[in-house]
Image (cartoon, grey):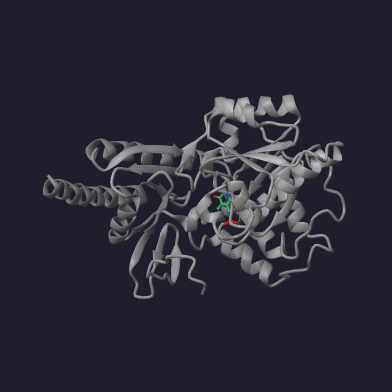
Amino acid sequence: MLPTYARVDLAFERGEGAWLYTAKGERYLDFTSGVAVNALGHAHPDLVKALTEQAQKVWHVSNLYRIPEGERLADRLCAASFADTVFFQNSGAEALECAVKVARKYQSASGKPERYRIITFEGAFHGRTLTTIAATGNKKYLEGFGPPVDGFDQVPFGDIEAVKRAIGPQTAAILIEPIQGEGGVRVASPTFLRALRQLCDQHDLLLVFDEVQTGIARTGEMFAYERSGVKPDVMALAKALGGGFPIGACLATTEASKGMTVGTHGSTFGGNPLAMAVGNAVLDVVMADGFLEHMRKNALLLKQRLAELKDRHASVIAEVRGEGLLIGLRMIPQASEMVDELRAEKMITVAAGDNVVRLLPPLIIGEKEITEAIGCIDRACARLAKTHARAAKVAS
Ligand SMILES: *Cc1c(COP(=O)(O)O)cnc(C)c1O
């Protein structure tokens, strides 16, 4: 395999709920969920059932024919959101590619083909295709891959004056994550999102939300934008929507998608019956009565316990932030050290930008997993505090 990942020397054979097991039977507490993907944990019986039942009917037919399970999933996503229409893909980056095409085509169909540029934000992450690395603007991702795809203007996250200055005659849209995930769990304030909405309305720009990481209940709402009351025109989803089955979706209003007529976009695999069956099963669970309330209650409990740990280990944890079960611990030592220490405790987490350790447990965790996690974090912090105190002493 191409060595683009610095993989940990650890393999899991099976999973159950919030737990992963190696072939030797070692058990790990999964607070990564495959980077916010396995929202319902591992081997959720409803998802297993949906996938295996569909596997015995039909796997793939192409988008040349109707896919009833896909139509149903699209209807449900629209009913639950601002959107009127959906295009399905296989990943987050593809959902963003579609969103960029929708935005540019909207302007072109409105008689303004010169408007193709999209304002994006520093610290953003939108994927690893050539277009989405250009949207992200991260030099590390762009280096050596030729001229970046043209049409993206980055401004500082949260800086409304910079957004205003960046709007020009060629601007088509503004693209933002309501909470930056990879960037380090940086939350856009509702005020900022409202100001973006206003600017978009004023200049006839589309507001595009990347909810690939935040969407499908991760933040305690079905979609993170609900918290701000600001509705986008276009939204990208992926990660949790398939609960572990690859899926992506670009949602839009009728008006925003008016340029996307027959022949303007396509995908061979996007929205195939296996993915659609699982997507519907994920919604069955997440939209069931009481699911969100239960999850929010546990998220609050976890956050309270983390706040106590932060107070107790003030030399290790600088800040606890995020919404719902998208939680960031901004660290004083290197975030990667904490990830390693937690793995030694048999708890897996993932680092993010801004020296943050992300906690992304499955949304189904309960008090038992929270207590377990707090114990692991407490012990890891105690060890880090000791190591760094010793290092500081040696240095002085
Ligand atoms: C993960 C992620 C993507 C990219 O998704 P892929 O499925 O890896 O292409 C895009 N945007 C955000 C916010 C993400 O978290």
User: Residue 237: image x %, image y %?
Assistant: 63, 49
Would you identify the image quadrant in which residue 129 lies?
Answer: bottom right
Residue 229: tell me if it is visible.
no
- Say whether residue 362 is left or right of residue 395: right
User: Residue 215: image x %, image y %?
Assistant: 58, 45
- Say whether residue 155 is left or right of residue 328: right
Q: How many labels does the image show?
A: 0
**Looking at the image, which is closer to me, 396 or 108?**
396
User: Residue 340: image x %, image y %?
Assistant: 31, 58
Residue 176: tell me if it is visible.
yes
Instruction: Determine the residue positioned at 69% across, 73% down.
Output: 56
**Looking at the image, which is closer to me, 354 or 11?**
354
Q: In which quarter of the image is the C terminus?
A: top left
**Looking at the image, which is closer to me, 109 or 130?**
130
Instruction: Determine the residue positioned at 84% across, 64% down.
Output: 64
**Looking at the image, which is closer to me, 77 or 260?**
260
User: Residue 287: image x %, image y %?
Assistant: 60, 45
- Say whether residue 58 is left or right of residue 119: right
Examine the rendered structure and indicate whether residue 62 appears above or below residue 339.
Answer: below
Instruction: Determine the residue positioned at 46% across, 52% down.
Output: 362
Would you identify the image quadrant in which residue 248 lies?
Answer: bottom right
